[in-house]
Image: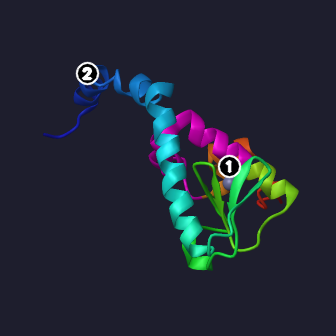
Amino acid sequence: MAKTPARRRTLGRRFRWVRPVVLSPVVARPGYWFATACAVVYGGILSGFRLRREGGLIVAPHLPRWAYGRGGTTVGAVYLTTDNITPAILEHEAVHRAQWRRYGMAFLPLYVEAGQDARRNRFEIEAGLTKGGYGR
Ligand SMILES: [Zn+2]
């Protein structure tokens, strides 16, 4: 069935409970813990178990560059990178950690939906474009 605007509105009404449930802390927080656990295992193995706490994050350094996106990627509380570790970057990634805590696993589709252009991605803008290395 084609999704006409009327059909879309009906679906929107029928599933309007999804957003508050998915984004409630009861659902989002375990998603954040799950993402963190997966990233600890992934980053732990790939970094040779050289994880460390820094800037409110668990940093997994010395990763091969194929193992994450851009200069580094935060998954849950874990910042995956090779060597892109400065105070500004850590501040930027700590905001992504807070976003993971707020949205849980829903952060993945929300981030993708926000777009690949960091300058227009609302999550990157919130984290700070200049601190994230996207400055003009
Ligand atoms: Zn970022």
- Is 109 displayed left or right of 95 in the figure? left
Dividing the image into four quarters, tell me where ligand 1 lies: bottom right
Local SS, label 2: helix
Q: Which residue is mark 2?
A: 14
- Is 2 displayed left or right of 99 in the figure? left
Q: Residue at x 76, y 60 (%)?
A: 134
Given the current orientation, which residue lies at the most extreme front position? 49
Find residue 66 and report its horizontal and vertical position in percent. 56, 77
The magenta stretch is: 94-116
The disc labelled 2 sits on which kind of residue?
Arg
- Is 95 displayed left or right of 76 in the figure? right
Using the rendered view, name the quadrant where residue 100 is placed: top right
Given the current orientation, which residue lies at the most extreme right position? 87
**The disc label shown at residue 36, or none:** none
The disc labelled 1 sits on which kind of residue?
Glu
CB atoms at circles 2 and 1 under 8 Å apart?
no
Q: Residue at x 71, y 43 (%)?
A: 95
Q: Is mark 1 within 8 Å of ligand 1?
A: yes
**Which of the marked residues, 2 or 1, is nearer the chain's N terminus?**
2
Q: Quadrant of the C terminus?
A: bottom right
Given the current orientation, which residue lies at the most extreme left position? 1
Q: Residue at x 24, y 23 (%)?
A: 10
Residue 135 or residue 71, whichever sits in front: 71
When the figure is inspected, residue 22 is found, relative to residue 67, above or below; the finding is: above
Residue 13 or residue 24, whichever sits in front: 24
**Residue 100 magenta-drawn?**
yes
Q: Which residue is mark 1?
A: 124
Numbered marks: total:
2
Q: Quadrant of the N terminus?
A: top left
Using the rendered view, name the quadrant where residue 11 is placed: top left
